[in-house]
Image (cartoon, grey):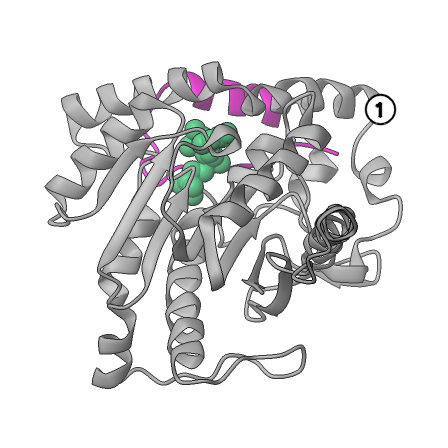
């Protein structure tokens, strides 16, 4: 799978992450690039994001040579290491301090705004007892009551980076906002930006989601690009399993997890959650057998909805979108 990287908001920002991204972009073929340049400013040097069942079969080998793919994979796997992010955010922090630059907006500003407004509508629906289902999209219309309801939601953004998604959620009316990242430099940047931009109440903490020290549970947990980054580590499959265990301890019962990914389709994320649920239920059943305790199906995730409004593209007769945003509810 080729890596995906998203163009930064500030085009004159220069730091190591850009250098890596550029070299990754240089490694993909012209064909690969030709399907990726669009108004969403997404470049496909960090993974493909064709929606649902509609990923073109054999598409990767159609776009790029085997060597291109191997090299791009080697480069993109750097995004699975903390050293990569520490270095990237050190550069971003310097750019912020010297030039006031905001830095990368992963997946682009449009996606960030869609994620925030869609999540707001979802939370209002749920607060008012309307749980969307497979066929029924979120419906909420913004009104004063809706805004009041949002103040009851405690929100955690894992792998928050520069924290801009939390700023966007604050603009939408959420007020209890916490961001974590394992990179100290990211947390420092996020705190500086939120102070500058008038959101001093957003809390930021250094925390590794795979070994979280947080004891609080949150009604809403957001992930934009963090599972993608974790999955790019050479031990990605194992780390992804740790991720689900950890995140299930961070989402309160009845709470929501909203994941935005460019490396997985909605159906792939649903399948990964289903695999996690099966593991969890099997472990609970063993506990039931050992302790004769019937409460065995706690803390599994249930798919509730996904963003349906991202622009789509057609490739090889199949239609897909580049980003997936999916919501799961913890039972
Ligand atoms: C693709 S960036 C996305 C940043 C941010 N969510 C955004 O949308 O702008 C991935 C982020 O995940 C963070 N990250 C990766 N692995 C992590 C882990 N195990 N624990 C906490 N943060 C992690 C990185 O430091 C980086 O900030």
Instruction: Judge the density around disc 1: few (<14), some (14-19), many (≥20) Cα neighbours within 10 Å.
Output: few
Please say whether residue 291 is visible from this viewpoint. Answer: yes
For ligand 1, tell me if the residue under mark 1 lies within 8 Å: no
Magenta residue check for 11: yes
- Residue 161 visible to an observer of this rendering: no
1 and 279: which one is in front? Answer: 279
Q: Does residue 33 show up magenta in the picture?
A: no
In the rendered image, the vertical position of residue 154 relative to residue 139, given as above or below: above
Q: Position of residue 331 (x, y in %)?
A: 58, 65
Judge by depth and name the residue closer to the eye, 52 or 319: 52
* Furthest residue in direction right, as rendered: 58
Q: Quadrant of the N terminus?
A: top right
Which quarter of the figure has residue 304?
Answer: bottom right
- Residue drawn where x is 34% and y is 55% of the image: 155
Asked where in the image residue 98 lies, by quadrant, the reply is top left
Q: Position of residue 198 (x, y in %)?
A: 11, 49
Q: Is residue 193 above or below residue 77?
A: below
Within the image, what quadrant is residue 195 found in? top left
Q: Which residue is mark 1?
A: 66
What x and y, as percent, mark residue 60?
81, 39
Is residue 291 left or right of 172 when viewed as pictured? right
Vertical comparison of 211 with 62: above or below? above
**Relative to 98, is 72 on the left or the right?**
right
Q: Secondary structure at mark 1?
A: helix
In the picture as drawn, the residue positioned furthest to the front comes out as 292
- Between residue 30 and residue 127, name the one nearer to us: 127
Total marks shown come to: 1
**Ligand 1 found in image quarter:** top left
Q: Residue at x 29, y 80 (%)?
A: 146
Range drawn in magenta: 1-26
Question: Residue 55: where, in percent of width, then height?
Answer: 79, 54
């Amino acid at each position: 799978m080729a890596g995906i990287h998203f163009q930064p908001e500030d085009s004159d920002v220069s730091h190591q992450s850009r250098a890596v991204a550029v070299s990754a972009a240089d490694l993909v073929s012209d064909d690969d690039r030709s399907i990726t340049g669009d108004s969403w400013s997404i470049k496909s040097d960090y993974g493909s994001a064709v929606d649902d069942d509609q990923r073109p079969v054999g598409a990767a080998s159609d776009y790029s040579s085997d060597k291109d793919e191997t090299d791009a994979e080697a480069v993109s796997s750097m995004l699975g290491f903390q050293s990569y992010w520490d270095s990237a955010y050190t550069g971003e922090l310097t750019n912020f301090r010297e030039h006031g630059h905001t830095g990368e907006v992963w997946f682009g500003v449009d996606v960030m705004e869609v994620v925030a407004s869609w999540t707001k509508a979802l939370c209002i629906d749920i607060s008012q007892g309307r749980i969307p289902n497979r066929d029924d999209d979120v419906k909420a219309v913004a009104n004063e009551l809706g805004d009041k309801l949002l103040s009851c939601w405690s929100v955690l953004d894992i792998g928050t980076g520069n924290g801009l998604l939390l700023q966007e959620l604050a603009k939408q009316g959420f007020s209890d906002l916490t961001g974590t990242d394992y990179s100290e430099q990211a947390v420092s940047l996020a705190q500086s930006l939120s102070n500058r931009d008038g959101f001093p109440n957003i809390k930021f903490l250094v925390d590794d989601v795979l070994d979280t020290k947080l004891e609080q549970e949150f009604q809403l947990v957001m992930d934009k690009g963090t599972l993608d980054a974790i999955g790019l580590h050479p031990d990605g499959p194992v780390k992804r399993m740790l991720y689900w265990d950890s995140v299930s301890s961070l989402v309160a019962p009845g709470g929501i997890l909203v994941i935005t990914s460019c490396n997985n389709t909605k159906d792939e994320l649903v399948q990964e959650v289903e695999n996690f649920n099966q593991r969890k239920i099997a472990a609970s059943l063993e506990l039931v057998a050992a302790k004769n305790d019937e409460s065995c199906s706690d803390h599994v995730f249930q798919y509730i909805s996904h963003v349906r409004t991202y622009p789509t593209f057609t490739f090889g007769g199949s239609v897909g979108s580049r980003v997936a945003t999916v919501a799961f509810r913890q039972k």
